[in-house]
Image (cartoon, rainbow, N blue to C red):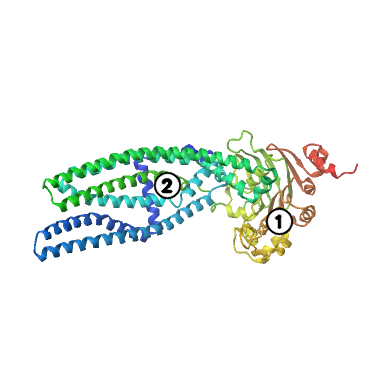
């Protein structure tokens, strides 16, 4: 399963090449357009409008000052009126610019929300389509974590910076046209003044990405320590054993380590940025001194001087902003590259395949099935074979780690064997359609989920949370021994099962287990029932009732540490370190005197007299 994801070193990738970066930028912009074409077009138009107004306002300021100087030396009302006209036009241009910028911010905020929702939805859909092996892969989890963490910010930031970069570039072109007409060297100064900060920030972008993505495991550890201190699940043992202070110490040490590295990184950036900022300011100051000098010499008018100083400042701001946008784009591309890597993860095909096997009477077969987890030396299952005919009961016995739960995942098609075949009705499970296979199997997994939803939803999950007739839900609850429990809940099936909700209600471990069993029974089309430790949290009376009435009419695979539950099984298989070491009925295995007999005797001894 090593091909399901990438390593953390792969995730912390270097700055992308030009072609790769351009491709990711285009894909992000295309995603934005698909999310909201009208909003994207409107933001583009406003960006163009806002980009051209600053140069116009600066040119009007020149006309205002020159008009005022002319009017002061003239008695003509026309000169005075012209100066007033120019100042009115300048004020109108600045007012329109201010209004347009505020409107642009409003629409960008809307785009941020809509694009964030769209990207998050894509990530969630992709995650839902992955196979169990992919979901359990640490590298894929790392990719999903980074994608979810930056889903609402980085794609939008990239698009926003592309718009900002276009705006700054257009403004810079209009500024350059005015500066070039007076002196090309002033435009050279504008560009030179912005380069130092650009170079420093570009170098920092890749360093910061590698730093923040590289410490994701420490961030997950910090979150886990927080949960141990704050959640009720850990509170009992934490309070009883008294290790809360030690958890706080470890949390503090981890914070100091992360904060220290973070501070050192930003300190380097701050000192470098300060030095480069001084250099940029010196370049700007040199240009301003030269403009004042030639104005004193009479080469240009006071209005021209004001416009040129404003253009120089505006141009330098545009260059700095343009370079900052470019640096931001480079940094954002590193994160969206991970997003696209997640989007390109191969998905499990769940729609195609057979809906029935060629031999409906054959039932379930394991033929020399082996399966290994990545990085494990010993196979979880090693050449296991057995046959479960229709209507038969199969018991599975073994110590923790013997392969029982792995076997369940193989039976349900969640795992694919490394070698051998799992057959249902004479057809390899790899050839079955996922939905058709699910309809054939009712499953209670170990560990099972406690859904912080309603009691109805906890059972309806057995049919993909589809709307289900209440009578059908209650029939499943009856088989799962949850009928009385539901009757005692404040709002019955509609009770929300979480103490964190105002109207919520929590359950005990045994009660949660009954809902999980009801979930397994809800699919009444299933002819194979798989129960992994179904009575682990039950009291003896409930366990006895379950075993008497709940297992009738279906093929059953029952995994239980309580071997007394398996005495009536048609066949019992014993797993030890992934191997099938014994198989037979209860009586046959007891007569064999092997591992099963020793385990059974060890459980029966406390109940024997004398």
Instruction: Compare residues 39 and 167 and report the one nearer the observer.
Output: 167
Helix, strand or loop under label 1:
helix
Q: Position of residue 561 (x, y in %)?
A: 75, 45
Coordinates of residue 241 in the picture (x, y in percent): 69, 43
Which quadrant is the N terminus positioned in? top right
User: Taking 588 as reference, is 74 above or below it?
Assistant: below
Vertical position of residue 567 compared to residue 582: above or below: below
- Front position in the image: 595 or 423: 595
Q: Is residue 417 left or right of residue 308?
A: right
Instruction: Find residue 336 and name its label.
Output: 2
User: Disc 2 vs disc 1: Cβ atoms closer than 8 Å?
Assistant: no
Query: If you read the primary sequence from the N terminus, does the residue marked by circle 2 or circle 1 appear first?
Result: 2
Q: Locate residue 47 relative to residue 417 in the image: left or right.
A: left
Q: Which residue is mark 1?
A: 511
Q: Residue pushed farthest right?
A: 610
The picture places residue 431, in percent across and down from the top left corner, at 57, 48
Residue 540 rendering spot, x and y as whole percentages: 79, 52
Q: Is residue 519 left or right of residue 162?
A: right
42 displayed left or right of 403: left
- In front: 234, or 34? 234
Classify the position of the C terminus by image quarter. top right
Numbered badge on residue 210: none
Spatial CA span between label 2 and label 1? 44 Å
The answer to whether residue 84 is above or below residue 158 is below
**Viewer-side residue, 179 vs 379:** 179
Q: Is residue 572 visible?
A: yes
Secondary structure of the residue carrying tag 2 is helix
Is the residue marked by circle 2 packed among few (<14), some (14-19), or many (20+) residues within 10 Å? many
Give residue 605's quadrant in the image: top right
Q: Which residue, as the protein is rendered here, is positioned at the far left? A: 75
Specify whether residue 12 is in view.
no
């Amino acid at each position: 399963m090593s091909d399901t994801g990438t390593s953390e070193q792969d995730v912390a990738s270097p700055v992308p090449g030009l072609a790769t970066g351009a491709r990711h930028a285009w894909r992000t912009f295309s995603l934005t357009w698909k999310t909201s074409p009208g909003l994207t077009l409107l933001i583009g138009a406003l960006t163009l409008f806002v980009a051209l107004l600053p140069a116009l306002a600066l040119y009007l300021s020149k006309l205002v000052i020159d008009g005022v100087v002319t009017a002061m030396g003239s008695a003509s009302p026309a000169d005075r009126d012209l100066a007033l006209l120019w100042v009115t036009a300048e004020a109108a241009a600045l007012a329109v610019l201010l209004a347009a910028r505020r409107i642009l911010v409003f629409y960008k905020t809307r785009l941020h929300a809509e694009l964030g929702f769209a990207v998050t939805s894509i990530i969630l859909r992709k995650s839902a389509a992955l196979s169990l092996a992919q979901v359990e892969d640490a590298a894929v989890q790392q990719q999903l974590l980074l994608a979810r963490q930056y889903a609402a910010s980085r794609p939008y930031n990239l698009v926003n910076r592309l718009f900002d970069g276009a705006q700054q570039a257009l403004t810079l072109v209009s500024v350059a046209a005015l500066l070039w007409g007076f002196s090309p060297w002033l435009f050279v100064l504008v560009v030179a003044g912005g380069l130092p900060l650009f170079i420093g920030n570009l170098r920092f972008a890749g360093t910061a990405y590698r730093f923040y993505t590289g410490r994701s495991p420490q961030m997950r550890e910090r979150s886990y320590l927080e949960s141990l201190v704050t959640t009720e699940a850990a509170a009992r043992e934490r309070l009883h054993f008294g290790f809360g202070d030690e958890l706080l110490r470890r949390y503090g040490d981890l914070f100091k380590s992360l904060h220290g590295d973070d501070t050192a990184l930003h300190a380097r950036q701050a000192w470098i940025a300060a030095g480069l900022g001084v250099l940029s300011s010196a370049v700007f100051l040199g240009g301003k001194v030269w403009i004042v000098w030639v104005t004193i010499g009479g080469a240009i008018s006071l209005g021209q001087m004001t416009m040129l100083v404003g253009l120089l400042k505006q141009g330098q701001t545009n260059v700095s902003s343009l370079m900052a946008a470019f640096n931001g784009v480079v940094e954002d591309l590193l994160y969206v590259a991970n997003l696209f890597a997640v989007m390109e993860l191969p998905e499990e095909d769940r729609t195609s395949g057979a809906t029935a096997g060629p031999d409906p009477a054959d039932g379930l077969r394991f033929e020399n099935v082996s399966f290994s987890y990545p990085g494990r030396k010993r196979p979880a299952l090693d050449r296991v074979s057995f046959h479960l005919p229709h209507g038969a009961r199969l018991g599975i016995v073994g110590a923790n780690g013997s392969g029982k739960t792995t076997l369940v995942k193989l039976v349900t098609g969640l795992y694919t064997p490394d070698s051998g075949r799992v057959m249902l009705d004479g057809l390899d499970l790899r050839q079955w359609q996922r939905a058709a296979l699910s309809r054939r199997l009712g499953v209670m997994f170990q560990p099972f989920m406690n859904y912080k939803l309603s009691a109805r939803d906890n059972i309806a999950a057995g049919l993909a949370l589809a709307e289900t007739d209440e009578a059908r839900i209650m029939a499943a609850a009856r088989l799962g021994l949850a009928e009385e429990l539901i009757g005692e809940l404040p709002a019955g099936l509609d009770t929300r099962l979480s103490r964190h909700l105002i109207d919520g209600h929590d359950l005990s471990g045994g009660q949660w287990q009954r809902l999980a069993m009801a979930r397994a029974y809800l699919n009444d089309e299933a002819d194979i029932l798989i129960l992994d430790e179904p009575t682990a949290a039950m009291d003896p009376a409930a366990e006895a009732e379950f075993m008497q009435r709940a297992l009738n009419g279906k093929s059953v695979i029952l995994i239980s540490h309580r071997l007394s539950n398996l005495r009536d099984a048609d066949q019992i298989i014993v797993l030890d370190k992934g191997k099938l070491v014994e198989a037979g009925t209860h009586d046959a295995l007891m007569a064999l005197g092997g591992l099963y007999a020793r385990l059974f005797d060890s459980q029966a001894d406390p109940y024997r007299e004398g």
